[in-house]
Amino acid sequence: MGDNLVFRSWFYFRMGWSTYFVFFLGAINTLTVTYFLAIENYPSLKAIFPSFEEYILVSVFVLVPALVFLGFAHYKKTKAFKSEIDVQIESNPYQRRNTVNGEINLRLSLKLLSLLMKFSKKEIPTDGEIEEIKKLYDKVLDLSEKRNFSNDLDLTFLQKEIRKT
């Protein structure tokens, strides 16, 4: 971690700059420029927004709810956010690995729980269930031995899973 201090600091600086500082600076700049270059020069707009302060109030009370709605729609009602996540998973091998590991852990946990439920009822797994567990074991073992962060086996696994649904 110590070797990456400069790069981590650079990352945190960029996040603070782009997420917070530039956001507020951009909002102030946009409000100022639109009012003093556009609204002040058009009498019909000047009648609607007689002062800069009133323009800011109307902008805040109209634009903020509209932008909240647009943000909600982006995440919940359109395919835009899913596309962003797809790109992140395709381009970030660590994100891919976490996603694949989560899916594999879920499958293994469910199999183990089904076995535990059988054993708790003093039942013996059928040959079909044992074969199913063996297939899952072989599949996970094969994937874990062959995959690495520089090949696309995790991505291929995810794409096959997405096509199943």
Image (cartoon, helix red, strand yellow):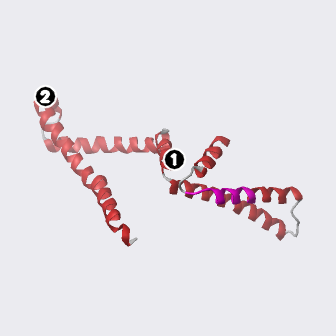
Mark closer to the chain start, 1 or 2 = 2
Q: Tell me: residue 46, above or below residue 130.
A: above
Where is residue 59, by image quadrant? top left
Where is residue 97, by image quadrant? bottom right
Residue 66 left/right relative to 76? left
Label 1 – label 2 distance at C-alpha: 49 Å
Q: Residue 109: say if magenta.
A: no
Q: Amino acid at mark 2?
A: Tyr
Residue occupied by mark 1: 90
Q: Quadrant of the C terminus?
A: top right
Mark 2, Cα crowd under 10 Å, few <14 / some 14-19 / many 20+, is few
State if disc 2 and disc 1 touch (CB < 8 Å): no
Secondary structure under tag 1 reads: helix
Judge depth for marks 1 and 2 and give the one in front. Answer: 1
Q: Residue 139: say if magenta.
A: yes
Residue occupied by mark 2: 42
Magenta segment boundaries in residue numbering: 137-148
Residue 28, position in %: x, y? Answer: 20, 47
